[in-house]
Structures are given as structure tokens and as C-alpha cells.
Image (cartoon, rainbow, N blue to C red):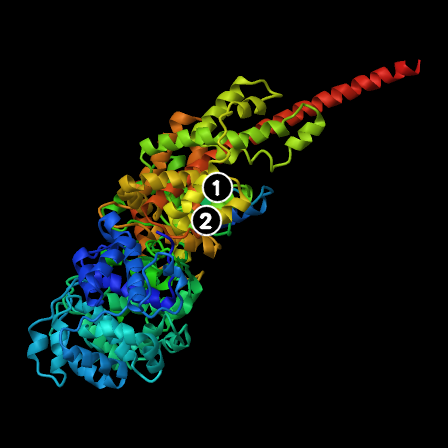
């Protein structure tokens, strides 16, 4: 599918809808049933719906991934505007209104919508909110039946709608938020975009901030009540209205909400959660918005000082804040990613409500890639719809994964500081980034700086990639002989400059590095590079280009965005695209693996560096952890590293340790990778491996060349000495 | 007891000032403060930021080897940096991190 560019509003809307459809709470796939209901609610003829389904690729995939869902939504909007359904129109149509879904089962809903848009309806909502809100058990659907309808309310007709939409909790929150925001400042915003949105939301009805008397729920999620007070306390909340109006409308409205509203929301949210530490969607949204006030980039980090200021406003004792920080700064980098921030915020709220701080981070608060999908989508308005970028958290999402990670850490911690960076790479995004900055300056030619989604490649694919590389390495190496014309100093000078040598090498894969080894070993010193280059006669020069071209359709946004950037900078990416195309072809079969690997890639993070972009991209990459829930991230990175090392070992024993580092470095290049789905990740992982190999090959080549240079200089010196010796004779 | 600590600190200082190497030995195993009556060993460790760690070990525990001490210092250093990362922690304040305390006690228990 072509890339999809969404405005902020659209992004938010679509992400909400996706969550709405995400009945399985997988954060990755919208259940077909819900999606089809939604499409039906769009009031389009069924043929159109079918066409949309096909266009967005859902029929091909068999399910609605996030990108498919977004594309479908956009197509619905297009169809509703009366435009013909074309894939090209996805991005070309500007100012497209949001798709409208009439979920209303009766007129009351329509009226409700009207009221909603009215913003004056705020009064209505509180009342209805009280009645309706059946606590959503977790994020799941919740059929609000019974109580909502039974409770007498002025908006009783509104009640019925509540029952219909199963995703009440989710929609409530959104809905409620808008209502709570329904103050003056919300009106213009709502009118613009909320109108459509609310139409969808209102059936879920206004659970709005009402004086929520929610039926008692199990232990109210911590911080529900205190949330309000915190909101009131924190200046950021007031600063929020100043924030980007379009995308953060809802959040801003929340911010400006009177404390009562938030209380209601909070109480509403508290329903039905057995896990007192679980963060509701609304809370999370709130946290995300707060995060945005400090750090507009949701994939970036909040520095410790900023976080300290922010949390000090909560008026908790410093000791407790310190403890909260310890708990939430999972990767111990001194900065908070979005997930860490949400966890910290949640703990603060809990503490303010009187909950004691746990000794260790509750599982539901562990930085999880999955949980960040929503927030990431909200923040990201990139075309990579399918890639739920979010500030990736490296560390294990689940406790089972913790032991493996902990086991890995002690071993790694044995190494020196340099290596500690590497070892922690598996545990934190920041580590990954730091590693990146360590490596990048050393070798500007590497492709590390370019983020590439990592894909866990099965060895079979790996071998195939190696084959690809082997064949594809010829063209670049063929350039090498030219530079290696002779043993003359002039030729050497031609050879010495960095640019020529690296160029051939980018195409080298691991296999080609093996070949290089062989050729290097086999040839004599002076002419070493030549045989190696000659060894790859079957150059496939055109391949990178076609593959690059192929990349776009196959790899989606990721490749198109990365390869153009990279191509002018480094020839490495020629092969990159090869792999991407290759990976694209492999995608269907390895999609789950890709997801797994992306999840694994997520954890592969190094210490935080200053490179925000890197972190962001790495975060995004990592956030593409995919839906493979059972996969534990920590074993993934460890396994990855081992696997990469294993793969490398047969190729080149010597480079094992180097390559693992290179792999780490390459993995560190996640930054700024545009999100992509499955195949892209695999492709990128493949290219990462390739680049890594290329790096080692280049390093080797460099040493070889240095050696040659020395030899030649010696020869020159000897020749000059001879000349000097002969010169006196010439005078005779 | 505190007198010994201060003495050992003085010795550490002395070692630091004598350092002509790059940043100073990161891991300085100082084994020698052995008082006839007290019978204990003091190990010093200086970080790059001149933070000094001192471990006092009873001499009766002769099973402690050099690497063990080094690993202990490494762990100490790691936990210390974790504590430092906490923005709420003012350098110079006594460390109140429970995690840090846990690690330290674990180490002590482990080495007996």
C-alpha cells in the first residue's frame, strides 16, 4: 500500500476508531466484525465497502491491520465525499472531512449528536454520564446495558445509544473528553472536527464528566480522584490549551476541564478494573497529553530535570518522587519515555490517592510497546499508519521476560564501559541510541545513522539474503579495481581516499564478507583488493535501482522514505533496497516473525543519547513491536544478538565479536525509521545485517589498504635510496 | 571505626593525586590498611567523577578474592549511577534509594 499521510486530526480520529475496533485489544488488528460494523455505519453501499476493503489490503492480509484500517477510513471519507475510490486519492485529496459513521440506532442518537455539537449540551452529558457509564472492564467492550437504561435521566433517550456501541468505554472517554472540554474554547474546535467525530462518539454517549456516580467498582484505579487535583495543580494543564489546537483538541479540552469533570472521568474509568495499577485509556490519553506539554515528540524523552519539575508540582515528598522515579525509569537513563512517563504519572496519581507505592513496578505499568500504540498514533501523523510508533521501551514488557534480561545483564555488565553500552542495548532504547552515537562518528560511511526497522530473519531468509548480497556485490566491487590500478603511489593515492573503497563494499553481505576474506587471504599483499573485486564479476549493478523502485510498493513508506534519503548519502542502501524488496516478497510468510522481530528490535535499545531523532526513530521502530504478545522482548534481543552472532560465526569467526557490536550499532540505527509493517522490518533488518557486514568488510579493507600503503611507501623509499646511490655514479 | 574510614580516605586521595595516567585508575584495589588490632581490609574505588567507594572487609573473611571485590565495586558503581540518574536525588544527599540499599545488602549477604 502506498503511504498514507494523515493530518493530526485524522490521525487522532483514526486511532480512536482503531481502538474502538480493536476488540481483542491487540493494538494491531481491528477485528473484522467490528470493522465491518463500522463500515456499515458509514452508510456506504456494500459494493463500495467491499471495494474499500480490497483497496486497503485487508482482503489480501485477511485482517485489518492498523494501516489497512486507516486506509480504509480514509477511503470511506473519500467515498462519503463522493469522490471515486482510488488509491492515489488517498494522499492527494486535501481537506477531506473525517469519515462519518452513523452508529445511532435511533433518533435519540442523532439528537444526541446535535446536542453534542452544541456544546451547550454539556449539561446533558453529565447527567447521562452518570447514568450510563458502565464501567468498561479493561479496554474491552462493554455492553452498557441495564444500569444505563434503567437509571432515570433527563437524557433517557440518549441512554439507549449507550447500549448499542459495545465499545462504550473507549468511546466514552473520547466523548467525555470532548464534553469536558466542552467549554468555550472547545466550541470552535469541536465544530470543526469534533462534529464529525462526535457523531461517532455520541452513541457511546456522553459519559462525560458528569458527577459520575458510577456504581462502585472494584478498587478504583488509583489516581482517579487525585487525577483531578493533580490536574488542577499542574500548570501544564493550563498550558495545554495553548498547544496545537488541531491534534490535541480533545486533550486540551480535557485540560481545561474543571476538576469535577475529570473526577467524573476518572471515576468512570475506575470501573471494573481489577488491576489497580492498570492505566485506563483515558488516563493514558491524559498522560500522553501531559507528556506532550513537556515533550512534543511522543517518541522522544523527557529529560530528568523537566520531569522533576513536573512531578514536583504534584506536591509529593521528594523521597516518594524519587522512589517513583526509580520505579518508572525503567532503563535507568535519566529520562522518561512516554511509557515511563505514563507509569510515573500513574504512580503519582496513585500515591496522591493514598495508595502505597509498590516496591517494584507493577506489570501493567511496565513499559510496553503495545500500550504505546495509541499514543504513538496520536502523536505521529506520518504516513506510516501501520506502524504503531511509540516511544519504545526496551525492557521486558512482561515479568517472564525479566529473568532472561536480568540474566543477560550480569554477563554484559562485566565488560568495560564501552561494552556496557552494548550490553544495555538490549534493554533500553536510550542505550541503543547511545551506541549509535558511539559508532556513527567513528565511521561516517556506515548506514547506521539511518534507521531501519529490524526484522528477525529466519536463517533461511538470511541465507537467501546472503545469496542476494553475493550476487549484488559485484557491481560495487567492480569499481574497486579501477581504483586499485597499480602499485604506484599515484594509484595508491587514488585508492587511499575513503570514498572509493566504501562504495564497493556496501553491497557486500555477510556472505560477501566471507568472500572477501577468502579473496584477501588468497591474494598477495599488493594486489589484494583486486582479486576480491574480481571475484565478484557477476555484478548486478542495475539491481539496486530496480529493487529500490520496487521498494516503494513493497515496503511502503519506510523504504521510500529511507532509501531516497540514504541513496545519495551512501551506496549501502542500494543493497538495502534489495533486501527490502526481498523482504517484501518474504513478508507474507514471515509477517509474524517480522512482528516478533520488531518487538525484539524494540527492546534493542541502547542508552539514551542526545540524538532525539535517533531515539525517536528507534522508538518508532521499536514500537512496531507488533501483536505477537507471547513474545518476550528481552529474550528477543538476546536471542537476536545471539542469533546474529550465530549467523555470523559460520561466516567469519573473527568478526563474531565485531559483528555483534556492529549488529548492535546497526540496530542502533533504528532511529528515525519510519514505521512499517512486517516486511519492511524484515527488509530493514536484513539490510542492517548487510550493512553490518559491509562495515566489517570495509574495516578489513581499510586495514588491508593501510598495509599496502605501507608496503608501497617502503618500496618507494627503497627506490629512492637506490636512486641516491646511483646518482653519484651518474656524475662520474 | 570512623577514624579508619577517614584514614583510608586520605590514602585514596593520596593515590588520586599521584595519578599521572589519564583519568586515574578506575578500579583501585587498595589492600593494605591492615591494622594489627582491627584486622580489616579497606578497598578503595574511584569513579571518573571522583566519587569514592570504600569497602571495609573483615580480615577473618579471607576467602574474598580480588575479582570479587572488583565485581562488588562494579555493582556498586552501577547502582550508584542508577541512583544518580534520578532527578529527584540531589548529589550529596544520603542515598535513600531502596533499590540501591537492596543491592548493597544483597552484596553484603552474598559475601558474608
Which of the pair A243/A566 is nearer the observer? A566
- In percent of width and height, residue B49 lies at 50, 52
- Left/right of residue A347 with respect to residue B57 in the rendered view: left
- In percent of width and height, residue A652 lies at 43, 26
- Left/right of residue A202 with respect to residue A253 in the rendered view: left
Tell which circle, 2 or 1, labels the residue nearer the N-terminal end: 2
Mark 1 is surrounded, within 10 Å at the Cα level, by few (under 14), some (14 to 19) or many (20 or more) other residues, namely many
- Measure the alpha-carbon separation of dots 2 and 1: 9 Å
Q: Which mark is residue A720?
A: none
Numbered disc 2: what chain?
Answer: A
Q: Is residue A666 above or below residue A618?
A: above
- In percent of width and height, residue A690 lies at 44, 36
**Element type at mark 1:** helix
**Element type at mark 2:** helix
- Left/right of residue A165 with respect to residue A433 in the rendered view: left
**In the figure, residue A221 lies in which quadrant?**
bottom left
The residue wearing badge 2 is A562
Residue shown at 11%/67% (left/top)?
A143
Mark 2 is surrounded, within 10 Å at the Cα level, by few (under 14), some (14 to 19) or many (20 or more) other residues, namely many
Q: Is residue A338 above or below residue A594?
A: below
Which of the pair A218/A296 is nearer the observer? A296
Numbered disc 1: what chain?
Answer: A
Residue shown at 38%/25% (left/top)?
A650
Which of the pair A191/A654 is nearer the observer? A191
Residue B9 in sight: yes
The residue wearing badge 1 is A573
Q: Are marks 2 and 1 in contact (CB under 8 Å)?
A: yes
**In the figure, residue A160 lies in which quadrant?**
bottom left
Q: Is residue A128 above or below residue A11?
A: below
Q: Quadrant of the C terminus of chain A?
A: top right
Q: Are marks 2 and 1 on the same chain?
A: yes
Amino acid at each position: 500500500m502506498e503511504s498514507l499521510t494523515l493530518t493530526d486530526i485524522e490521525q487522532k480520529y483514526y486511532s480512536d476508531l482503531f481502538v474502538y475496533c480493536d476488540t481483542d485489544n491487540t493494538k494491531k488488528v481491528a477485528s473484522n466484525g467490528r470493522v465491518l460494523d463500522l463500515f456499515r455505519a458509514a452508510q456506504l453501499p456494500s459494493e463500495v465497502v467491499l471495494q474499500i476493503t480490497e483497496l486497503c489490503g485487508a482482503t489480501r492480509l485477511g485482517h485489518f491491520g492498523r494501516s489497512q484500517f486507516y486506509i480504509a477510513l480514509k477511503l470511506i471519507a473519500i467515498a462519503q465525499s463522493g469522490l471515486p475510490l482510488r488509491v492515489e486519492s488517498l494522499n492527494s485529496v486535501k481537506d477531506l472531512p473525517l469519515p462519518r459513521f452513523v452508529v445511532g440506532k435511533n433518533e435519540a442518537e442523532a439528537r444526541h449528536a446535535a446536542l453534542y455539537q452544541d456544546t451547550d449540551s454539556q449539561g446533558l452529558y453529565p447527567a447521562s454520564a452518570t447514568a450510563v457509564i458502565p464501567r468498561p472492564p479493561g479496554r474491552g467492550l462493554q455492553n452498557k446495558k441495564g444500569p444505563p437504561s434503567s437509571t432515570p435521566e433527563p437524557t433517557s433517550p440518549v441512554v439507549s445509544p449507550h447500549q448499542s456501541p459495545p465499545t462504550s468505554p473507549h468511546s466514552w472517554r473520547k466523548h467525555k473528553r470532548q464534553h469536558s472540554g466542552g467549554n468555550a474554547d472547545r466550541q470552535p474546535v469541536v465544530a470543526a472536527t469534533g462534529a464529525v467525530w462526535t457523531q461517532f462518539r455520541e452513541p457511546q454517549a456522553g459519559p462525560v464528566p458528569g458527577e459520575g456516580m458510577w456504581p462502585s467498582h472494584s478498587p478504583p484505579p488509583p489516581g482517579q480522584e487525585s487525577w483531578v487535583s493533580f490536574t488542577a495543580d499542574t500548570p501544564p494543564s493550563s498550558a495545554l490549551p495553548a498547544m496545537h489546537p488541531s491534534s490535541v483538541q480533545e486533550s486540551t479540552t480535557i485540560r481545561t476541564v474543571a476538576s469535577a469533570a475529570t473526577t467524573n472521568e476518572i471515576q468512570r474509568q475506575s470501573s471494573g478494573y481489577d488491576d489497580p495499577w492498570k492505566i485506563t485509556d483515558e488516563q493514558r490519553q491524559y498522560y500522553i497529553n501531559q507528556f506532550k506539554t513537556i515533550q512534543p515528540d511522543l517518541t522522544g524523552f523527557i529529560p530528568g530535570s523537566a520531569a522533576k519539575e513536573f512531578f514536583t508540582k504534584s506536591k509529593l515528598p521528594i523521597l516518594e518522587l524519587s522512589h517513583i522515579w526509580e520505579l518508572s525509569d525503567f532503563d535507568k537513563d535519566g529520562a522518561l519515555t512516554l511509557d515511563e512517563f505514563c507509569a510515573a504519572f500513574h504512580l503519582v496519581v496513585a500515591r496522591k490517592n493514598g495508595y502505597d507505592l509498590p516496591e517494584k513496578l507493577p506489570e501493567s505499568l511496565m513499559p510496553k510497546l503495545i500500550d504505546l500504540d495509541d499514543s504513538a498514533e496520536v502523536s505521529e501523523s506520518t504516513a506510516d499508519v501501520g506502524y504503531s510508533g511509540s516511544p519504545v521501551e526496551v525492557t521486558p514488557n512482561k515479568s517472564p521476560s525479566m529473568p532472561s534480561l536480568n540474566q543477560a545483564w550480569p554477563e554484559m555488565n562485566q565488560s568495560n564501559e564501552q561494552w556496557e553500552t552494548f550490553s544495555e542495548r538490549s534493554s533500553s532504547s536510550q542505550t541503543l541510541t547511545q551506541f549509535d552515537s558511539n559508532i556513527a562518528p567513528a565511521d561516517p560511511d556506515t548506514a547506521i545513522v539511518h534507521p531501519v526497522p529490524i526484522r528477525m530473519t529466519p536463517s533461511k531468509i538470511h541465507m537467501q539474503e546472503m545469496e542476494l548480497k553475493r550476487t549484488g556485490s559485484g557491481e560495487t566491487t567492480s569499481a574497486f579495481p579501477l581504483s586499485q590500478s597499480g602499485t604506484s603511489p599515484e594509484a595508491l593515492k587514488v585508492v587511499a581516499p575513503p570514498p572509493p573503497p566504501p562504495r564497493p563494499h556496501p553491497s557486500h553481505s555477510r556472505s560477501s564478507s566471507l568472500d572477501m576474506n577468502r579473496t584477501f587471504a588468497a591474494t598477495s599483499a599488493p594486489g589484494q583488493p583486486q582479486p576480491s573485486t574480481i571475484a565478484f564479476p557477476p555484478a548486478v549493478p542495475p539491481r539496486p535501482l530496480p529493487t529500490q523502485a520496487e521498494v516503494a510498493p513493497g515496503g511502503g513508506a519506510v523504504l521510500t522514505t529511507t532509501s531516497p534519503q540514504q541513496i545519495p548519502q551512501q551506496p549501502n542502501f542500494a543493497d538495502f533496497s534489495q533486501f527490502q524488496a526481498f523482504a517484501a516478497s518474504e513478508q507474507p510468510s514471515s509477517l509474524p516473525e517480522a512482528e516478533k522481530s520488531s518487538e525484539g528490535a524494540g527492546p534493542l535499545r541502547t542508552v539514551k543519547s542526545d540524538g532525539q531523532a535517533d531515539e525517536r526513530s528507534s522508538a518508532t521502530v521499536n514500537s512496531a513491536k507488533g501483536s505477537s504478545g507471547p513474545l518476550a522482548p528481552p529474550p528477543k534481543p538476546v536471542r537476536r544478538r545471539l542469533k546474529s552472532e550465530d549467523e555470523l560465526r559460520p561466516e567469519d569467526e573473527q568478526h563474531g565479536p565485531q559483528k555483534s557490536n556492529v549488529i548492535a550499532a546497526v540496530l542502533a540505527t533504528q532511529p528515525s525509521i519510519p514505521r512499517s509493517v512486517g516486511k519492511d522490518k524484515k527488509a530493514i533488518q536484513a539490510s542492517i545485517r548487510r550493512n553490518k557486514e559491509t562495515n566489517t568488510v570495509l574495516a578489513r579493507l581499510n586495514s588491508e589498504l593501510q598495509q599496502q600503503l605501507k608496503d608501497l611507501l617502503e618500496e618507494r623509499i627503497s627506490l629512492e635510496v637506490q636512486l641516491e646511490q646511483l646518482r653519484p655514479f651518474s656524475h662520474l | 571505626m570512623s577514624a579508619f574510614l577517614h584514614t583510608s580516605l586520605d590514602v585514596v586521595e593520596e593515590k588520586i593525586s599521584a595519578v599521572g595516567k589519564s583519568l586515574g585508575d578506575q578500579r583501585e584495589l587498595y589492600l593494605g590498611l591492615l591494622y594489627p588490632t582491627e584486622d580489616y581490609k579497606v578497598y578503595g574505588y574511584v569513579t571518573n567523577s571522583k566519587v569514592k567507594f570504600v569497602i571495609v572487609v573483615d580480615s577473618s573473611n579471607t576467602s574474598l578474592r580480588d575479582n570479587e571485590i572488583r565485581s562488588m565495586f562494579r555493582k556498586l558503581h552501577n547502582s550508584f549511577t542508577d541512583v544518580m540518574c534520578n532527578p529527584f536525588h540531589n548529589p550529596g544527599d544520603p542515598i535513600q534509594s531502596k533499590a540501591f540499599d537492596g543491592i548493597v545488602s544483597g552484596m553484603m549477604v552474598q559475601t558474608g
